[in-house]
């Protein structure tokens, strides 16, 4: 049995405070956990990587991506932070491809989803079907859009939502880090507001919990308890895949002025 690990961290920058918690579990079916996460509020970087199951050494690719996030330094300008992060991902993409080629490993890769924050600015970057949700007030929004065959078919009108639920190739991803010479990265930007809560996760969570399910949990519990509950609920509902979750809550500095 794999025991979930949690990373509790509080960090203060010029804009406010972050309360973030991360956990990962192999699930009830998979013998190996190919998910990895990185969480460092001091540099404003959170990341989930889901190694490609059924391919060579997905866990190694995910680990390399998580390690690359640790090389992103502190930046006072958000554009510089985003540029640094992108540069690290392009380098690790090539490192993964070189490793696979040198050892004859075939296709080797991992999804990626990251939250980058500087001051009040944030950017979400992703490749694959790991997701980021933002709960603001009582509204839950999925900030990412899955890079999957089924999502592409929904987008072009050849598949409706009902048929998509039973689509045989619904887990086939169209983009990932390590599979092409130049990685495909999508981005969305925004500005933080007091109380914003982000959930970064692998598809081991979203395979069992809907967006309303996730919202109910994060609205009813503090970030640490919510992170644990999200993973536990996925396990109780079958745990058919590795499941990794990061919950990040932002608070304006005045609301937390008594903390040290």
Image (cartoon, rainbow, N blue to C red):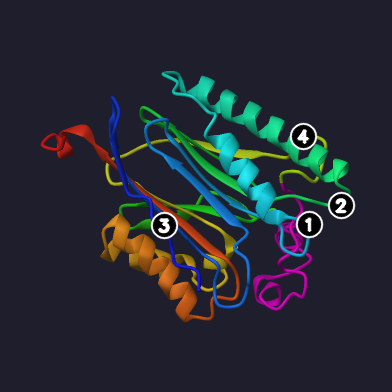
Q: Which dot, 1 or 4, sits closer to the camera?
A: 1
Q: Are marks 1 and 4 in contact (CB under 8 Å)?
A: no
Please tell me which of labels 1 and 3 falls first in the chain.
1
Place residue 218 in its image quadrant: bottom left
Q: Residue at x 13, y 34 (%)?
A: 257
Place residue 83 in its image quadrant: top right
Task: Decide which of 57, 18 is in the foreground and name it.
Answer: 57
Cα distance between the residues tagged 2 and 4: 14 Å
Magenta residues, as a range?
Answer: 148-176
Q: Are marks 1 and 3 in contact (CB under 8 Å)?
A: no
Left or right, 77 with respect to 242, comes to: left
Q: Main secondary structure of the magenta part?
A: loop
Q: Residue furthest left?
A: 258
Q: Residue at x 70, y 70 (%)?
A: 160
Q: Are marks 1 and 2 in contact (CB under 8 Å)?
A: yes
Please tell me which of labels 1 and 4 falls first in the chain.
1
Place residue 64 in its image quadrant: top right
Label 2 Cα neighbours within 10 Å, binned few <14 / some 14-19 / many ≥20: some
SS for dot 3: strand
Label 4 Cα neighbours within 10 Å, binned few <14 / some 14-19 / many ≥20: some
* Residue at mark 2: 106
Label 1 Cα neighbours within 10 Å, binned few <14 / some 14-19 / many ≥20: some
Above or below, comparing residue 190 to residue 243 in the picture: above
Asked if the magenta segment contains residue 190, the reply would be: no
* Residue at mark 1: 56
Residue 209 drawn at (x, y percent)? 49, 71
Please tell me which of labels 1 and 2 falls first in the chain.
1
* Residue at mark 3: 140
Q: Which mark is residue 94?
A: 4
Q: Which dot, 1 or 3, sits closer to the camera?
A: 1
Please tell me which of labels 2 and 3 falls first in the chain.
2
């Amino acid at each position: 049995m794999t025991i979930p690990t949690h990373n509790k961290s509080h960090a203060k920058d010029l804009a406010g405070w972050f309360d973030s918690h991360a956990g990962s579990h192999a699930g009830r079916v998979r013998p190996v956990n190919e998910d990895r996460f990185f969480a460092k509020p001091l540099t404003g970087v959170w990341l989930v990587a889901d190694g490609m199951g059924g391919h060579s050494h997905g866990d190694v690719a995910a680990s390399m991506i998580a390690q690359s996030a640790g090389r992103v330094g502190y930046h006072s300008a958000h554009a510089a932070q985003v540029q640094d992060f992108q540069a690290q991902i392009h380098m690790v993409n090539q490192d993964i491809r070189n490793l696979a080629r040198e050892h004859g490993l075939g296709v080797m890769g991992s999804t990626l989803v990251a939250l980058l924050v500087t001051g009040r600015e944030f950017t979400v970057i992703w490749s694959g079907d790991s997701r980021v949700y933002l709960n603001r007030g009582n509204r839950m929004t999925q900030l990412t859009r899955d890079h999957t065959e089924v999502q592409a078919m929904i987008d072009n009108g050849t598949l409706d939502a009902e048929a998509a639920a039973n689509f045989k190739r619904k887990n086939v991803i169209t983009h990932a880090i390590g599979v092409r010479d130049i990685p495909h990265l999508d981005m969305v930007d925004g500005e933080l507001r007091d109380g914003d809560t982000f959930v970064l996760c692998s598809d081991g969570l979203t395979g069992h919990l809907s967006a309303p399910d996730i919202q109910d949990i994060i609205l009813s519990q503090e970030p640490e308890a919510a992170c644990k509950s999200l993973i536990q609920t996925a396990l109780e509902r079958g745990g058919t895949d590795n499941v990794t979750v990061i919950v990040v809550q932002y608070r304006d500095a005045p609301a937390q002025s008594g903390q040290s």
